[in-house]
Amino acid sequence: MDANEVITRYASGERDFRGADLQGLNLANENLRDINLRQANLKQANLTGADLKGANLREALLGKCVLQDAQMELVNLIGADLSHANLNNVNLNEAGIRGANLTGSRLEKAKMQNANLNEATLDHAQLREADLSHSALNRCHLIEADLTLAKLESTSFANAILTGATLTGANLSTALLSGANLDNADLGGADLSRAKLQGCTLVNAHLVQANLRGANLSWSSLRGAELRGATFYRAKLSWSNLSGATLNEAVMINASMEYVNLRNAVLTGAILPDGKTHE
């Protein structure tokens, strides 16, 4: 099937193209709303700027597909393969992307509010300045993903794996990260105010100048973490492990620190919970 046949059949009212072999086709800027492409082969296809709102792409093959600037609100991408696809500036608001493979994909400035990405794989994905606010990424894999300046307000990352991920300057205000693994992640300057990080692991994580105001870090491990200048005002750190962490000039006024492990931690210049500065 070539591109002209797809366009002609769609224009005549046909919507069911499930399992079709459309590999490499150029369908850029086409109106394909509500099309059924379940299990279709769209590898390396060009869908730049296409209107795919409400489309069914469940279990479709979209490896190395170009979907830049595409309109994909409410699309079904459950279990789809989008590895190494170009989705820069795509609109995936309220999309169902559960269990999809987005390894190495490009999602810079993508709009993905209220999307369901539970159990999806986004290892090495480029998500700079993407908007994933209020989305679900529980049990997701984001190993060494780039989320620099991403909008992640109230996003759920429960039990997600973000080892080595870059979240510099990201907005994680009120985000849920309970049970997540952020070992060696870079969260420098990130906003984690009122975030829920209970039972989270942040071993050797970089949190310089991070805003953890009102965050809940109880029972978390921050061994060897770099926390210079971080703000912990009214944060909950009970039973957390900060052994070997660097806390120079950190602000911990009114922080809850019962049973915290601070063995070998560096606290020079830190403002302690009682307001006194550590010498």
Image (cartoon, rainbow, N blue to C red):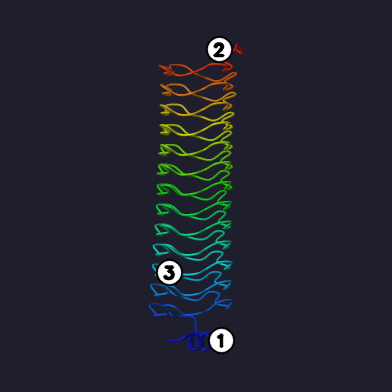
Q: Which mark is residue 23?
A: none
Q: Mark 1 and mark 3: span between their CA atoms?
A: 23 Å
Kindly indicate the quadrant of the structure image that contains residue 18.
bottom left
Q: Nearer the viewer, mark 1 or mark 3?
A: 3
Q: Which element carries disc 3, helix, strand or loop?
A: loop
- Residue at numbered disc 1: 11
Please, is residue 67 above or below residue 211 in the view?
Answer: below
In the image, 19 versus 245, the foreground residue is 245
Q: Earlier in the sequence, mark 2 or mark 3?
A: 3
Residue 180 position in % (x across, y down): 42, 39
- Residue at numbered disc 2: 278
Horizontal side of 179 relative to 134 (left or right) equals left
Q: Which element carries disc 1, helix, strand or loop?
A: helix
Q: Nearer the viewer, mark 2 or mark 3?
A: 2
Q: Which element carries disc 2, helix, strand or loop?
A: loop
Kindly indicate the quadrant of the structure image that contains residue 80.
bottom left
Q: Earlier in the sequence, mark 2 or mark 1?
A: 1
Q: Residues within 10 Å of mark 1 (few under 14, many from 20)?
A: few
In the image, 162 versus 146, the foreground residue is 146
Q: Going 50% across and 76% down the picture, which residue do you hit?
A: 35
Q: The disc labelled 3 sits on which kind of residue?
A: Leu
Q: Which mark is residue 62?
A: 3
Q: Residues within 10 Å of mark 2 (few under 14, many from 20)?
A: some
Pointers 2 and 1 in contact (C-beta within 8 Å)? no
Residue 254 position in % (x across, y down): 59, 18
Q: Mark 2 and mark 3: span between their CA atoms?
A: 55 Å
Q: Mark 2 and mark 1: span between their CA atoms?
A: 72 Å
Please, is residue 179 above or below residue 125 in the view?
Answer: above
Q: Going 49% across and 54% down the picture, which residue do you hit?
A: 126
